[in-house]
């Protein structure tokens, strides 16, 4: 069982118009049919240009946004409906669970997260409202547990930590809330150890955020995230606001902590060199959709999608003897997410486009053991009959 499974995740933001009477005139499809997973002690990198949906994925995993559709299974539990209102949660359960054939023929071959819901469904004799009540019986506890199990570190530590609280106040709060420390004295001792663990000094506990450099503030944000012993950490561009030398220190710290905590990381970045260094697997996003995913080494060694190739061609090359592959560079702008092109979203910028590209969105083809690409060029290279649906816009 993987630590995190994201399946067919969608997050659409409504576009509203009108002053006194608002109406929804369309949607920004920030995340559209995205699926990936991460194991304990491993990292998945999510890359793409600004506005491709990377940050929305991270926030939706943490339930800071409510998903429009799809499943987010953390440690064997579907967390997707934890924060939904009752009506929406019942609709979600009906659509994603109650309609499964296994629910009407004895619950055979269900996965662990499905089995929990199946048991509640049986106990409630198929009544959706009662099933939800059984599942929600200890929902506050479940939500609290999710807040402990999954943490996020944002790009700009100055806007994610409270400038009016000392480091001690900031870090003791979650320890007491999650009962990791029995009392304030114990919490203070834990915080001092945490500060040393992230490369700060124990006496920093009484200082305020403005008394630290940017790199030190990010260490505080990391200390706060790891203080509650999370199993999953979403790192949303954690080094983008830092100097290059400080970036390297923070990445090394994150790597060391991962070994200590055995935590799974979702590493969101537009820095390909960093993603290559830190990630075991990666997902390349374009306009809310995945265009390529698989083992990081396979993608860096043999990028398949024209967009991935363009991203790699545009990245700085550290070795002066090596030349950039300028042939793969692309021009143009990312189209508006409100009005995405028909067919393959990348076709207005693609050098390899074919007539079919303007008409049909390409499905995800499996071209190697763990290497998938959404591009019509690879239709003939598909190695399995089972490919994930690409879907129409
Ligand atoms: Fe280019 Fe067509 Fe592939 Fe899209 S599907 S990336 S337009 S070749």
Image (cartoon, helix red, strand yellow):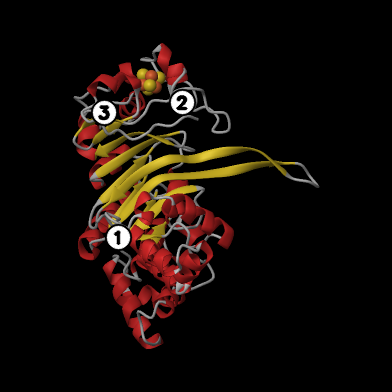
Give x and y (percent) for residue 174.
42, 74
Of the numbered discs 1 and 2, the one sitting upstream in the chain is: 1
Q: Is residue 329 visible?
A: no
Give x and y (percent) for residue 353.
39, 15
Question: Which numbered dot is residue 383?
Answer: none
Q: CA distance from mark 1 to mark 2?
A: 36 Å
Q: Residue at x 45, y 66 (%)?
A: 125
Of the numbered discs 1 and 3, the one sitting upstream in the chain is: 1
Q: Nearer the viewer, residue 238 or 142?
A: 142
User: Label 2: which residue?
Assistant: 345
Q: Residues within 10 Å of mark 1 (few under 14, many from 20)?
A: some
Q: Residues within 10 Å of mark 3 (few under 14, many from 20)?
A: many
Q: Horizontal placement of 338 versus 196: left or right?
A: right
**Disc 2 within 8 angstroms of ligand 1 (CB):** yes
Tell me if residue 115 comes above or below residue 358 in the rendering: below
User: Label 1: which residue?
Assistant: 112
Q: Horizontal placement of 25 versus 95: left or right?
A: right
Give x and y (percent) for residue 134.
46, 71
Q: CA distance from mark 2 to mark 3?
A: 18 Å
User: Label 3: which residue?
Assistant: 303
Q: Residue at x 32, y 50 (%)?
A: 247
């Amino acid at each position: 069982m993987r630590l995190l499974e994201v399946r067919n995740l969608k997050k659409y933001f409504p576009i509203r118009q009108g002053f006194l009477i608002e109406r929804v005139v369309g949607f920004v499809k920030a995340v559209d049919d995205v699926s990936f997973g991460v194991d304990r002690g491993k990292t998945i990198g999510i890359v793409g240009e600004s506005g491709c949906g990377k940050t929305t994925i991270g926030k939706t995993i943490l339930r800071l946004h409510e998903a429009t559709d799809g499943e987010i299974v953390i440690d064997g539990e579907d967390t997707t409906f934890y924060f939904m209102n009752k009506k929406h949660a019942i609709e979600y359960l009906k659509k994603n669970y109650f309609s499964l054939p296994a629910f009407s023929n004895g619950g055979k071959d269900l996965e662990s997260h499905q089995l929990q819901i199946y048991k509640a469904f049986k106990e409630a004799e198929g009544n959706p409202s009662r099933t939800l009540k059984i599942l929600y019986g200890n929902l506050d506890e479940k939500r609290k547990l999710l807040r402990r199990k999954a943490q996020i570190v944002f790009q700009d530590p100055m806007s994610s930590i409270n400038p009016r609280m000392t480091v001690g106040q900031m870090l003791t709060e979650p320890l007491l809330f999650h009962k990791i420390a029995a009392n304030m004295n114990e919490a203070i001792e834990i915080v001092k150890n945490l500060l040393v663990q992230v490369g700060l000094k124990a006496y920093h506990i009484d200082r305020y955020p403005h008394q630290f450099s940017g790199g030190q503030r990010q260490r505080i944000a990391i200390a706060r995230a790891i203080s509650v012993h999370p199993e999953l950490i979403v790192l949303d561009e954690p080094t983008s606001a830092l100097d290059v030398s400080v970036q390297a220190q923070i990445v090394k710290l994150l790597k060391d902590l991962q070994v200590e905590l055995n935590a799974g990381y979702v590493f969101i970045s537009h820095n390909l060199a960093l993603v290559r260094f830190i990630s075991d697997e990666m997902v390349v996003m374009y306009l809310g959709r995945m265009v390529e995913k698989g083992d990081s080494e396979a993608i860096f060694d043999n990028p398949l999608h024209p967009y991935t190739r363009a991203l790699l061609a545009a990245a700085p090359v550290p070795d002066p003897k090596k030349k950039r592959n300028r042939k793969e560079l692309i021009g143009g702008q990312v189209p508006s997410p409100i009005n995405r092109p028909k067919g393959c979203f990348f076709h207005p910028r693609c050098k390899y486009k074919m007539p079919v590209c303007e008409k049909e969105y390409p499905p995800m083809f499996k071209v190697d053991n763990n290497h998938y690409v959404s591009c019509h060029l690879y239709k003939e290279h598909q190695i399995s009959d089972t490919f994930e649906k690409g879907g129409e816009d």
